[in-house]
Amino acid sequence: MEIDLSAYKSNIAFFTKKLFPTKLMAVVKSNAYGHGAVEISHAAIESGVDRLAVAFLEEALELRAAGITVPILVFNYFNPRYAVEALKNKLTITIYSRRQLEEIKKHIPSGLKVHLNLDTGMRRLGPDINNALELAIDISRTGYDLEGVYTHFAVADEKKEQFTLAQVLIYKKFLEELKKARVNIKIRHIANSAGALRFNESIFDYARIGVASYGLQPSEEFYIDELMPVLTWKSVVSYVKKIKKGDSVSYGRTFIAPRDMTVATIPVGYGDGYNRGLSNKGEVLISGKRCRIIGRVCMDQFVVDVSHLPQKPKMGDEVVLIGTQGEENITAEELAKLLGTINYEITCAITSRVPRIYLRRENLT
Ligand SMILES: *Cc1c(COP(=O)(O)O)cnc(C)c1O
């Protein structure tokens, strides 16, 4: 994998400008959507981002161990007995239930920095508006610093705006309630990538930008031209051979050659996160041309048809799995579509076996 940090920075610059005065919280969970959390976090900070967010405490600890000192918000559950790690490492935790608050209190009686997650329609984490005020007051009384309140959109990526606007209204109503109860909140945040691109009139102090910062399209229903893909996934040809009409290829003999063919083997498989669902479906680029996968994707390799290439490829030739080669381009979105999933899952799935190489192109802004 080549990770173009200049492209990442250009996406951050695009959002910084578009959302001003709202600031960015760079979401780097799941190893920065597969791109490498430490390097991406450094690039975000170099671009002026002053806050990061991850799903799990362990992810935040990895960033602290790498010398990253900006505030880091942890979105998700952690075992309450590790609250001491959150405090020691100056992490900001999410509180989403009374039960969780009570458990954490047993370990850390005061001093934690907290954001409260309000449920406005996602029904995943957090109290609804009828139960949230009491929890907010309790958090403050505990002697925790209730710095922020946030919520999360369920359908910001869809054309219909009604549900998202209703979520914004509930959130605003809760902010009013907090004000009346004299609970002072410094940081309010509501939007993910899709939300930030569409609802910039009401996105408050921070936007939590994940997918779009990696140049991945946040929605199937609208396309953002300015986003630059950050990731290129390459391999090489390991072997080329001729096969005969009627020969089968790979496990399960799911492909039978309809004619004599030239085929190439690529040393990548589902052990690298190249989805087995792409068997007999996916394409790769060789010599700037699309080559179809034939037979099943194995753990460490798969085979493609190269019969149509004007020049027979040879061992060591570049193969592009995601990215551009010559005039052709394969996107994470294209693979997602073939697999009936979203681009997020394609890049998150790329395993640690695939080396990440970080590029800094100074001529880009
Ligand atoms: C993952 C996540 C985000 C980022 O969403 P994108 O669609 O990738 O921009 C924001 N907020 C929360 C709570 C998340 O879990």
Image: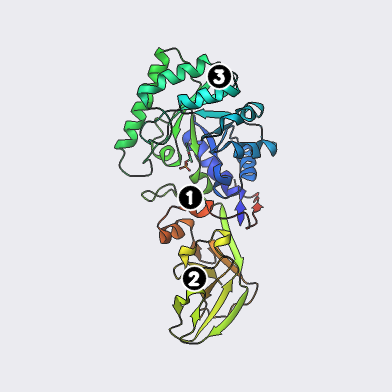
The residue at 61%/31% (across/down) is: 82
Q: Is mark 3 within 8 Å of ligand 1?
A: no
User: Vertically, is 61 above or below 354?
Assistant: above
Q: Which residue is mark 2?
A: 296
Instruction: Report how far apart the C-alphas of labels 3 and 2 lie in the structure.
Output: 54 Å
First of labels 1, 3 by sequence position: 3
Q: Which residue is mark 3?
A: 144
Q: Which mark is residue 286?
A: none
**Does the rendering let one see residue 91?**
no
Instruction: Report how far apart the C-alphas of labels 1 and 2 lie in the structure.
Output: 23 Å
Quadrant of res 71:
top right
Circle 1 or circle 3, nearest the eye? 3
Mark 3: which secondary structure? Answer: loop
Q: Which residue is mark 1?
A: 344
Instruction: Please provide percent x and percent y for residue 207.
Output: 48, 34
Instruction: Please provide percent x and percent y for residue 352.
Output: 62, 54
Mark 2: which secondary structure? Answer: loop
| Quadrant containing the C terminus in the rendered view | top right
**Does the rendering let one see residue 177?**
yes
| Label 1 Cα neighbours within 10 Å, binned few <14 / some 14-19 / many ≥20 | many
